[in-house]
Image (cartoon, rainbow, N blue to C red):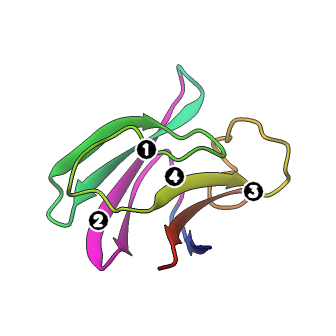
Amino acid sequence: MTTLYKIPLEGVNAWFTQRVTLDDNDYVLSFIWTERESRWIFSVLDSQGGDIVRGIPLNESVDLLHRFKDARLPEGMLFLYDGEHLHCECTKEGLGDRWTLYYGVDDE
């Protein structure tokens, strides 16, 4: 069974950072809206702001970190969920409202 944790996104502007604790480790998530691509891009940084992974497209309903192999990343799944179940790209205004970010961990 998987336990899901909603990651509240605060101060959603065209660029913002969010501090989170996942698997007892502190991270900084950085979000940037790109007008040219009309999409959100995010990065995962350590608690001091050092890069772990950068430039990840914020796609809906996929594990956003699955392709990265870095021991500093959390072990669970990080994914974006469309609250209206339409499975379309996240809009600039919809992040944190219609589209929410979740972290899932397998229960042991």
Give how far apart the Cα atoms at labels 2 and 3 are: 23 Å
What span is in magenta?
12-35
Q: Is residue 22 left or right of residue 92?
A: left
Depicted 28 relative to depicted 2: above or below: above
Question: Picture quarter containing residue 22?
Answer: bottom left
Depicted 36 relative to depicted 106: above or below: above
Q: Which structural element holds mark 1?
A: loop
Q: Residue at x 75, y 56 (%)?
A: 98
Which of label 2 and label 1 is nearer to you? 1
N-terminal label among 4 and 2: 4
The residue identified by callout 2 is 27
The residue identified by callout 3 is 98
Q: For the residue carrying disc 1, how many other residues have a C-alpha within 10 Å: few (<14), some (14-19), or many (20+)?
A: few
Q: Which structural element holds mark 3?
A: loop
Q: Residue 82 location, x and y as percent? A: 75, 52
N-terminal label among 3 and 1: 1
The residue identified by callout 4 is 13
Q: Which structural element holds mark 4?
A: loop
